[in-house]
Image (cartoon, grey):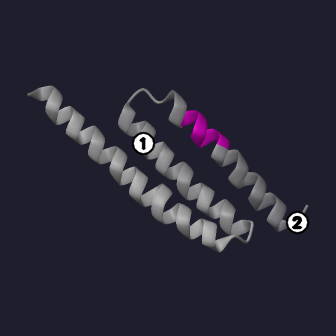
Amino acid sequence: MTLFDIISLVVGVLLLVIAFLAINAKKLINSVLFLSALSMLAVVSFVLLKAPDVAITEAVIGSGLVTALFIFTLLSVRKEETK
């Protein structure tokens, strides 16, 4: 087994574990944070697969924009619930 295989295996297992945690999180904000971590690990796996263009797109849109949108939406929904 090469170093690449070991790193790929570790990243794949971490992807599965974090996806499971995101699904089973009790608080919605924790799910969003787990999904952000999942997206960042996807970036690592795309880099390992030598797809830097896909990795950059995933980093910008998946990790940055979508996470910010989810958090902004959660905060605005909570503000409307308190009114």
Residue 57 lies in quadrant = bottom right
Amino acid type indicated by mark 2: Thr
Q: Position of residue 51 (x, y in %)?
A: 69, 70
Q: Position of residue 71 (x, y in %)?
A: 32, 46
Nearest the eye: 83 or 22 = 83
Residue drawn at (38%, 33%) of the image? 28
Q: Residue furthest right?
A: 1
Q: Which SS class for mark 1?
A: helix
Q: Position of residue 66 (x, y in %)?
A: 42, 52
Residue drawn at (40%, 51%) of the image? 67
| Cα–Cα gap, marks 1 and 2 | 34 Å
Give the residues in magenta: 16-21
Q: Which residue is mark 2?
A: 2
Q: Is residue 7 left or right of residue 2?
A: left
Amino acid type indicated by mark 1: Val
Nearest the eye: 79 or 2 = 79
Residue drawn at (59%, 39%) of the image? 19
| Marked residue nearer the N-terminal end (1 or 2) | 2
Q: Which residue is mark 1?
A: 32
Q: Is residue 19 magenta?
A: yes
User: From what the image shows, is residue 45 above or below residue 23?
Assistant: below
Q: How many marks?
A: 2
Nearest the eye: 71 or 1 = 71
